[in-house]
Amino acid sequence: MSLRVWEERVVPRLVDLSLRGHEVGELRDVTCAGLTGRVLEVGFGGGLNVRWYPPEVDAVTAIEPSDLGWQLSARRRARTHLPIHRAGLDGQRLALPDDSHDAALVTFSLCTIPDPLLALREARRVVRGGGRLHVLEHGLAPHEPVRRWQRRLEPLQRAVAGGCHLTRDVPAMVAAAGWEVEDLEQDYLPGPSASRPWVFVTRLRAV
């Protein structure tokens, strides 16, 4: 199997399966709470956030690079009357007007975007003044033994998981892109200690 086939036909299915569990669902619920109006979602994937959009959301602009990911989301999109429009493939270059959205949502996508700072700056451009960014992401752990394993495993992770990084400092990236972090929670997901390089999770809101 070629790398291209693996990334286009296998990785989106693996991501969808691995991120649909109950514990992650609870975090999605908390992350989506407070979203209102027109929402930009960068890294829509298989639409795993759709069930958690609060009733105050009027419409969603989806940015999703994977055609298979978009296909996987069809059943979830069909369950909601909320208009969801796929508006591009690349979160780093949004063909959207300035100040055209009320909020932005990014879940488990900053790890794979080649230039996450550019994507966060683009989201800031598209979201109106006073609008908020909601993020749920895995990344750099606070404990050095775990960080050492993250650095060792990252080349393999990037090769088999569509470019996914383990060592990105999510709050630092958000702040560097010009957002002001207002609400921040970080912790490991429950599980064996061997899973810690993959499961240090950040949930934040920024304005």
Image: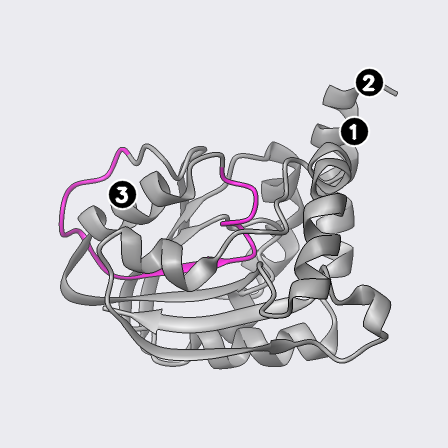
Q: With 7 as the anchor, is 206 left or right in this view?
A: left
Q: Which residue is drawn at 59% across and 51% down?
A: 167
Mark 3 Cα-neighbour bin, 10 Å: few <14, some 14–19, many ≥20: some
Pointer 2 residue = 2
Q: Quadrant of residue 174?
A: bottom left
Q: Residue 122 carries which label?
A: 3
Q: Give the x, y percent position of residue 21.
A: 74, 71
Q: Are marks 3 and 2 in contact (CB under 8 Å)?
A: no
Q: Which residues, given as a range, are shown in magenta?
A: 95-113
SS for callout 3: helix
Mark toward the start of the polypeptide (3 vs 2):
2
Relative image position of residue 124 (x, y in whole percent): 23, 52
Instruction: Specify the amino acid type for callout 1.
Output: Trp
Main SS of residues in magenta: loop
Residue 180, quarter of the rendered image? bottom left
Disc 2/disc 1 C-alpha distance (Å): 6 Å
The residue wearing badge 1 is 6
Q: In which quarter of the image is the C terminus?
A: bottom left
Q: Is mark 2 on a helix, strand or loop?
A: loop
Report the quarter where the N terminus lies: top right
Against 122, residue 207 (above or below) is below
* Mark 3 / mark 1, whichever is N-terminal: 1
Give, as a three-letter code, the residue at label 2.
Ser
